[in-house]
Image (cartoon, helix red, strand yellow):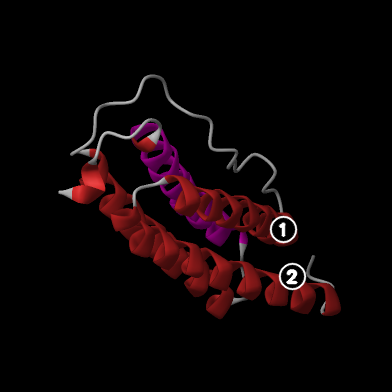
Amino acid sequence: MAIFRKEPGTAETVDLLRRTEADAAEACRRAATLISGEPLTRGALLAFAVEHEDHRIALEAIAAKLPRPRGHPETGISTERMTSPGSALRALRQHAELAARRLGEAMTRLPDGLVPTIRAQRNVWLRHRAWLGARIDAFARSSVV
């Protein structure tokens, strides 16, 4: 299959993206625990976690057909800064910016057969980033941050 050519860096890039999605799902679940009195916000964050889990599973299926990369890349996604609803939303927005940039770069490096999958995942991150920005603004206006 053309998308599974053993091009230099493909396995490492897919592994980094897979780990990014796994860490993002965990970060969304953690952020949701910090949100109280905002059931729609909490529900959206839990839905985001499910989307990131779906992406992780799709990337694991691709990674299973590639050589195993060496080491475990640092994704840059952390839940340590999440101490309040506002800090959680800001951290998630930073994660979304990082992931969207990483996915955009991956689209230029990965085999053409993987680009539609990566593009779709990037679009989800961009949607999350926009939603998070709007929620941060709303929280700031209501002094919840």
In percent of width and height, residue 114 lies at 32, 55
Question: Label 2 amino acid?
Answer: Ile
Q: Is residue 4 left or right of residue 8?
A: left
The circle on residue 23 is none
Residue shown at the point (27%, 52%) measured from the top left: 57
Q: Is residue 131 left or right of residue 60?
A: right
In percent of width and height, residue 129 lies at 62, 67
Q: To which residue does mark 1 refer?
A: 90
Residue shown at the point (23%, 35%) measured from the top left: 66
Q: Secondary structure at mark 1?
A: helix
Mark 2–mark 1 contact, CB under 8 Å? yes
Q: To which residue does mark 2 refer?
A: 136
Callout 1: 10 Å neighbours few (<14), some, many (20+)? many
Q: Nearer the viewer, residue 16 or 82?
A: 16
Residue shown at the point (82%, 79%) measured from the top left: 142
Residue 80 is drawn in which quadrant?
Answer: top right
Q: Is residue 90 left or right of residue 46?
A: right
Q: Nearer the viewer, residue 31 or 2?
A: 2
Q: Earlier in the sequence, mark 2 or mark 1?
A: 1
**Image quadrant occupied by the C terminus:** bottom right
What range of the chain is rendered magenta?
11-34
